[in-house]
Image (tube, helix red, strand yellow):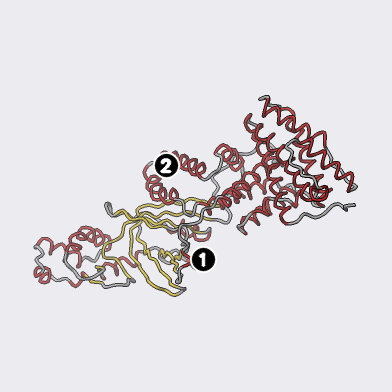
């Protein structure tokens, strides 16, 4: 006599999670309510039941004990073979047998008769869930709460967030669970976009566009979002339904709140279940379909990393930062990601047309390898929240480099302040150009000196000067007092 229940082995637990996935997928599509979703829901409900029956055959080692191979696709045959085995070898039996057979009939109506039994679905979805829960209790000695999506997640942070959401749903904290599911989806989406060319390409464009035409910016941002969601393997219609819930989250759950639609009813378990199912399936989909990089840079002998310096702020995020250069229009941009504390300082300290010291430090095996700093004029910038928790902000800085205002360089430099009228004439420089350069050198007003630096830049660069960088020590001395301090002592 076999004593039941018996705890599932590790491999059996994995199959139980997949079976529950069918069940969750069934409920997910039932909640969407469309005709096609109802069809998918019925199919997945039937799949979950058949999958559970086949798991029982392996779990109880029925084929080995009876010497009979069970490979029938007929549900009634599977049920009959399992019931006979249970009667002969245990003191248990299958529950809800008539109900699960009815579910197979509903599935056949959809599959073969093209009839959509919408009214019956809710009732039999409940029966299917009861069948599943009863099997877990009778034969495995576990509850449905011990079979969770979170056990399949590889990323430790996302796994814990999903565990928290599961507990919140169990405790009836549906609003908190939905906010958590929003955070899960956003953070997983951010991690999944690490090598996205679309993320890299849009940043400087949207920064410029936001400054030029706000309406066009929001229209194209919406199109961009829909395209990115679709190409990432997420069903766009499901995402929009999920986002409707997110739009109802009140201020206390939002790192960047711009108003919300008040839900005219109490939050319900089905709301939280849908959001949990959507977020969990998205994470599983991205982890399952993750494609490794063409080259693994961690295999290199030396380890390199870098940090961006903006005045007195240090911003480190090697995996997502990007620099842009458009030499045709002397336009540059930096794409950065910062936490909430840094964002607070940036919001107070960033101002278009102000002067900033922008630099980058490169490290080799933990030791400083190179330093590059230059003074820039911020043309415009774009800030947007990408993850509520952990709080992550995307910052795009569009700027112009002030000519000759380089400092902390590694390489040969030439100070153009050393030019004299006689030296310039010896170099063959025409008198008008000589006067322009000398006027620049003697200028003591920072604003005018910056203006003149742009006027003479191309001409100075055309001179044959044997140095990697051309600087103006007098310009640097005038510009330096004008940079904004972000007051990092507040961190």
Q: Is residue 295 above or below residue 388?
A: below
Of residues 364 and 459, the one drawn nearer to the viewer in this rendering: 364
Q: Secondary structure at mark 1?
A: helix
State which tag comes first along the sequence, 1 or 2: 2
Q: Residue at x 31, y 65 (%)?
A: 479
Q: Secondary structure at mark 2?
A: helix
Label 2 crowd (10 A; few <14 / some 14-19 / many >=20): some
Viewed as shown, does residue 360 lie left or right of 17? left
Residue 154 sits in quarter: bottom right
Tell me how far mark 1 sits from mark 2, CA to CA: 33 Å
Of residues 344 and 176, the one drawn nearer to the viewer in this rendering: 176
Q: Position of residue 119 (x, y in %)?
A: 73, 27
Of residues 481 and 156, the one drawn nearer to the viewer in this rendering: 156
Q: Comparing marks 1 and 2, which lies closer to the viewer?
A: 2
Q: Residue at x 60, y 41 (%)?
A: 242
Viewed as shown, does residue 371 lie left or right of 227? left
Of residues 487 and 410, the one drawn nearer to the viewer in this rendering: 410
Label 1 crowd (10 A; few <14 / some 14-19 / many >=20): few
Residue of label 1: 490
Q: Position of residue 281 (x, y in %)?
A: 62, 46
Residue 107 sits in quarter: top right
Q: Is residue 49 above or below residue 317?
A: above
Q: Which mark is residue 217?
A: 2
Q: Residue at x 27, y 63 (%)?
A: 446
Q: Position of residue 220 (x, y in %)?
A: 43, 40
Q: Is residue 306 above or below residue 95?
A: below
Q: Which residue sits furthest front? A: 67
């Amino acid at each position: 006599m076999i004593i039941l229940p018996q705890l599932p082995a590790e491999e059996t637990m994995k199959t139980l999670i997949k079976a529950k996935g069918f069940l969750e997928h069934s409920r997910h599509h039932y909640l969407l309510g469309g005709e096609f979703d109802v069809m998918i829901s019925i199919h997945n409900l039937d799949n979950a039941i058949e999958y559970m029956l086949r798991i029982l055959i392996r779990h109880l080692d029925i084929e080995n004990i009876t010497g009979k191979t069970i490979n029938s696709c007929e549900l009634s045959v599977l049920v009959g073979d399992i019931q006979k085995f249970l009667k002969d070898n245990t003191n248990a039996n299958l529950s809800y047998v008539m109900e699960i057979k009815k579910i197979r009939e509903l599935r056949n109506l959809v599959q073969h008769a093209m009839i959509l039994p919408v009214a019956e679905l809710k009732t039999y979805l409940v029966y299917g869930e009861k069948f599943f829960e009863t099997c877990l209790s009778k034969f495995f000695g576990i509850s449905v709460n011990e079979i969770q999506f979170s056990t399949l997640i590889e990323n430790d942070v996302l796994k814990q967030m999903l565990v928290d959401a599961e507990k919140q749903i169990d405790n009836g904290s549906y609003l908190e669970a939905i906010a958590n599911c929003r955070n899960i989806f956003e953070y997983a989406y951010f991690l999944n976009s690490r090598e996205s060319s679309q993320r890299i390409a849009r940043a400087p464009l949207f920064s410029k566009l936001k400054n030029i035409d706000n309406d066009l910016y929001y229209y194209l941002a919406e199109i961009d979002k829909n395209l990115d969601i679709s190409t990432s393997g997420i069903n766009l219609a499901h995402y929009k339904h999920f986002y409707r819930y997110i739009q109802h989250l009140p201020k206390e759950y939002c790192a960047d709140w711009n108003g919300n639609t008040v839900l005219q009813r109490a939050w319900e378990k089905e709301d939280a279940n849908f959001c949990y199912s959507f977020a969990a399936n998205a994470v599983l989909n991205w982890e399952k379909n993750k494609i490794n990089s063409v080259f693994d840079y961690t295999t290199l002998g030396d380890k390199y990393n870098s940090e961006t310096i903006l005045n007195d702020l240090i911003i480190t995020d090697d995996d997502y930062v990007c620099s842009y250069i458009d030499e045709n229009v002397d336009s540059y941009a930096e794409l950065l990601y910062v936490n909430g504390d840094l964002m607070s300082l940036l919001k107070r300290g960033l101002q278009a047309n102000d002067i900033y010291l922008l630099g980058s430090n490169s490290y080799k095996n933990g030791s400083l390898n190179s330093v590059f700093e230059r003074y820039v004029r911020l043309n415009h910038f774009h800030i947007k929240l990408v993850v509520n928790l952990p709080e992550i902000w995307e910052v795009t800085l569009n700027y112009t480099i002030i000519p000759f205002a380089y400092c902390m360089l590694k390489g040969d430099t030439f100070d153009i302040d050393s030019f004299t009228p006689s030296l310039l004439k010896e170099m063959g420089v025409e008198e008008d150009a000589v006067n322009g350069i000398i006027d620049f050198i003697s200028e003591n007003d920072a604003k005018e000196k910056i203006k003149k630096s742009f006027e003479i830049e191309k001409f100075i660069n055309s001179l044959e000067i044997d140095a990697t960088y051309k600087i103006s020590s007098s310009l640097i001395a005038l510009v330096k007092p004008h940079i904004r301090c972000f007051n990092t002592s507040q961190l």
